Structures are given as structure tokens and as C-alpha cells.
């Protein structure tokens, strides 16, 4: 028998996107070499389907048209193979089986070329008010999460970057208990948000009780990496700010000793683009993120007399929500001197339409020698606390994650909640 040889079988094996496309299968060898070609698709459930060389589509049942029998009439044979659009992602096997009179140049009995069609994944972006760390934090906002999540869908094999604009509005709860406003560090009116305030979270379950130990065993360590922070637990409490120092199998070593019960769920956070990329395999950047507080304006409800001497004055307002007590914020807009520590809010008696604030007054120190009256209807401008904060910026996605992922902006890093006093 005259033995023929297949010299090469080539087809691009780079990952495919979710769109329909065609790739050329090229086979070189001796004239007269014969073989069978099968193309098999394995979908996300593990079920196989087969390429029909006549209809150019995949079918569940295997029939004669799913096998292409070919004898080479020249030293080169080429055929395009059509791959369908598929958002879920699949793996294709292009199989070339030599016939009895044909061998492969490099030995072996079958050539199997695999191509992966990468499905689309969703990246979800949202603000995190901190209620997993303290349930009280959730009460400070009008919604949980405080504003609508933003999602972006893409493929890990796409070229170029995707820009996702963000415009969130955070509103303080309209509540006599929690409506004392939001404050930035140093009571500034705006705050530039560092990339390190973004995080992704993974929860895992403790396997075995520990007491004052830096070592603990989990049921799983999927999506955990060295450098992640242990932020919260669904039962008990976290000591300090422990970071994962080492992972060995399902055993973690933490930077701070903990006492935890068997079966409790722990929340681990990867903060900043570097750690986030290691968890989900994405490449991301955060551009020009800033939080700006909307100026808070209140109206005096009744005439208020400020004496010439030092002291404290109660000012009745048409609603107090957003104003923080505790000597942290200042009121402006009075027809009095605003020097020194004048007009600092000592305490707030909260109300949606009434209420009052107690304000520090040092008239004598500021050379105010006569009584000063602030009349009803006077507008007061609050410096330091806000009832509303707007967050804007752009998330740049250079590479989408291998699986669906969620990124959160940690509001507790830069927003302090006001109190009555």
C-alpha cells in the first residue's frame, strides 16, 4: 500500500469573540492523502453538537454530513468553517483523522485543534454605604445601595478600551434620627477619590473555630489572594484590620489574630486596581473620580436675637436635615461677624419642616457691642455638611473579567455621618 503523509493542519486557535465569524482550515500533504474532518462544539453545559459541512450550522444529532471525507487532489486543501455567534461562550474541537493509507508527519493518530469562544461577562459598578460592616450605615441614605448600579457587558478578547461614565447622587435620609448630613475629611466641600477606595469582595465560610489565632481554615479560598482585607463577618466581630498574609491550601494566615466560630461567613475585600485585577483577571482604571457636596441652604423660621455678650443662640429653622452638630460645621449668612469660632453648630434638634440649631456666639470677642437680630426668612449657608453628594468619574475597562464581577466604591473611606451633637 502506498502510504501518504499529512504534513500540517493549521487553523487560527486564538480566542474568538461572541460574534459570528469564519476561520480557514488549511491542510497540506501528499496528493492522494485522505482524512476525515469533524468539528465538535462543547457548550457551557457540556453537551456536544456537530458541524454540518453542507448547511454550515451545528446540529445536536450526528449525521453523515457532520463528517467531511476528503482525498487531496493537490498538496494543499483549504475549507472555511463558520462559527456562530454565542454570548455564553463555547469550546470547539477541529478534529482531523487520517484514513488507513495516510499518516501524520509528526506521528500520532488524530489531530485535535481547540478554539475557545469567550462569552460576554458583566462588570457591575456600585457605591457601598458600609452596611455589611455596620447596619447603622445603611440608615444614613435614602436607598441601599445609595444610587443605581451601573453595568457594562464585554468580552475578554475584545480589543481597545471601554469607557463607562459614572454619575451617582447620594442623599442623606430624611430622618430625625439619621438626617444630620454627610461630611468629607476636614469638612471640605469636595473630595478627590483615590483608586484605592474601590474594592471587590469575596465571601467564604470558616471551617473550624479559632481563638486568638492568625491561622484559620476555610471551606474554600476561591478568589482570595494575599493582600486582601478581612472586612466583616455575619456573626461576631473582626479585630483590627487583618490582611491575608499567606494562603496554603484552604488555610489562611492573617496579619491580626482573630477569634471566629465555625460556620460563620467572612467578607474579604481586594482594594485598588492591582489587587482587583489579580482576583478577576481584569484590567481597569478609575479616571477623575471626585465627590462634590451640594451646598446646603436653610431658612430661619422666626426672628432670632444675638446678644452682645458671648454665649450660645438657638436658631429656629424651616427644617434641619443635612446639618451636623458636634462643633464640626459653621453657619454663614447672618448679619453678624463670622470671625473666630462664631456660628459653629453645637447641636441640632431635628425636624423635616421645623427644628432648630444651637450655635456658638462670641459677640464680645468680635467687637459686637449691640444686639443683632436675624429675621425670619434669612437664608443660612451650611459649610461642612451636605444633604446631597454627587460622585462623578469614568471607569476605563481595558480587559473584562473572566467571570461576572462586581466592583464597589467604599463610601466609609471618605464620608462621615453627622450627628445631633
Image (spheres, rainbow, N blue to C red):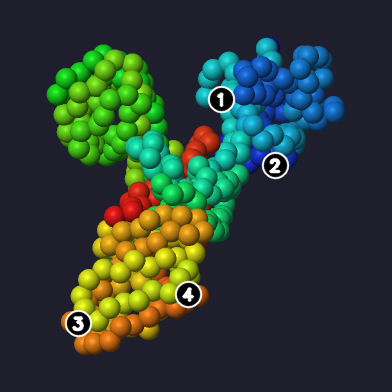
Secondary-structure class at tag 2: loop
Q: Splitting the image into 4 quarters, where does residue 41 fall?
A: top right
Nearest the camera: 304 or 292?
304
Mark 2 vs mark 4, CA separation in Å: 66 Å
Q: Which residue position is annotated with label 1?
A: 105
Residue at the outermost right position: 55
Mark 1 vs mark 2, CA separation in Å: 35 Å
Q: Which residue position is annotated with label 4?
A: 376
Instruction: Choose the circle earlier in sequence order: 3 or 1.
Output: 1
Kindly identify which numbered label has been placed on residue 19.
2
Mark 3 vs mark 1, CA separation in Å: 102 Å
Nearest the camera: 363 or 272?
363
Mark nearest the camera among 1 and 2 is: 2
Mark 1 vs mark 4, CA separation in Å: 97 Å
Q: Residue at x 22, y 71 (%)?
A: 311
**For mark 3, does the 10 Å Cα neighbourhood hold few (<14), some (14 to 19), or many (20 or more) residues?**
some
Instruction: Choose the circle earlier in sequence order: 1 or 4.
Output: 1
Residue 170 in sight from this viewpoint: no
Q: Position of residue 126 (x, y in %)?
A: 50, 46
Q: Position of residue 419 (x, y in %)?
A: 33, 52
Kindly identify which numbered label has been placed on residue 364.
3
Q: Residue at x 72, y 20 (%)?
A: 49
Secondary-structure class at tag 3: helix
Amino acid at each position: 500500500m502506498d502510504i501518504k503523509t499529512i504534513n500540517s493542519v493549521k487553523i487560527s486557535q486564538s480566542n474568538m469573540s461572541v460574534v459570528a465569524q469564519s476561520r480557514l482550515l488549511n491542510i497540506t500533504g501528499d496528493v492522494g492523502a485522505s482524512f476525515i474532518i469533524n468539528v465538535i462544539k462543547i457548550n457551557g453545559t457540556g453537551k456536544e453538537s456537530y458541524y454540518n459541512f453542507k448547511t454550515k450550522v451545528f446540529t445536536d444529532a450526528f449525521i453523515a454530513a457532520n463528517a467531511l471525507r476528503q482525498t487531496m487532489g493537490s498538496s494543499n486543501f483549504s475549507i472555511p468553517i463558520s462559527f456562530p455567534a454565542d454570548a455564553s461562550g463555547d469550546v470547539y474541537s477541529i478534529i482531523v483523522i487520517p484514513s488507513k493509507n495516510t499518516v501524520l508527519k509528526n506521528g500520532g493518530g488524530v489531530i485535535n485543534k481547540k478554539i475557545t469562544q469567550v462569552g460576554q461577562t458583566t462588570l457591575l459598578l456600585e457605591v457601598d454605604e458600609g452596611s455589611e460592616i455596620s447596619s447603622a450605615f445603611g440608615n444614613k441614605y435614602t436607598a441601599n445601595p445609595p444610587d443605581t448600579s451601573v453595568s457594562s457587558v464585554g468580552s475578554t478578547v475584545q480589543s481597545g478600551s471601554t469607557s463607562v461614565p459614572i454619575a451617582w447622587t447620594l442623599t442623606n435620609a430624611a430622618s430625625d434620627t439619621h438626617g444630620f448630613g454627610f461630611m468629607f475629611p476636614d469638612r471640605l466641600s469636595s473630595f478627590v477619590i483615590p483608586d484605592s477606595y474601590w474594592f471587590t469582595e469575596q465571601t467564604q465560610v470558616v471551617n473550624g473555630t479559632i481563638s486568638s489565632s492568625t491561622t484559620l481554615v476555610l471551606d474554600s479560598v476561591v478568589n482570595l489572594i494575599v493582600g486582601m482585607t478581612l472586612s466583616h463577618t455575619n456573626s461576631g466581630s473582626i479585630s483590627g484590620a487583618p490582611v491575608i498574609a499567606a494562603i496554603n491550601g484552604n488555610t489562611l494566615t492573617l496579619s491580626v489574630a482573630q477569634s471566629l466560630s465555625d460556620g460563620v461567613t467572612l467578607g474579604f475585600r481586594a482594594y485598588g486596581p492591582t489587587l482587583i485585577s489579580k482576583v478577576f483577571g481584569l484590567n481597569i482604571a478609575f479616571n477623575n473620580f471626585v465627590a462634590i457636596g451640594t451646598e446646603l441652604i436653610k431658612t430661619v423660621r422666626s426672628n432670632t436675637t444675638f446678644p452682645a455678650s458671648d454665649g450660645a443662640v438657638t436658631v429656629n429653622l424651616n427644617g434641619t436635615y443635612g446639618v451636623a452638630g458636634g462643633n464640626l460645621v459653621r453657619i454663614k449668612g447672618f448679619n453678624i461677624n463670622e470671625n473666630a469660632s462664631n456660628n459653629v453648630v453645637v447641636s441640632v434638634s431635628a425636624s423635616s419642616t421645623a427644628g432648630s440649631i444651637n450655635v456658638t456666639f462670641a459677640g464680645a470677642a468680635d467687637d459686637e457691642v449691640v444686639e443683632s437680630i436675624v429675621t425670619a426668612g434669612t437664608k443660612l449657608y451650611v459649610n461642612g455638611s451636605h444633604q446631597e453628594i454627587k460622585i462623578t468619574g469614568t471607569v476605563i475597562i481595558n480587559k473584562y473579567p473572566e467571570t461576572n464581577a462586581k466592583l464597589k466604591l467604599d463610601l466609609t473611606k471618605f464620608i462621615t455621618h453627622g450627628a445631633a451633637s
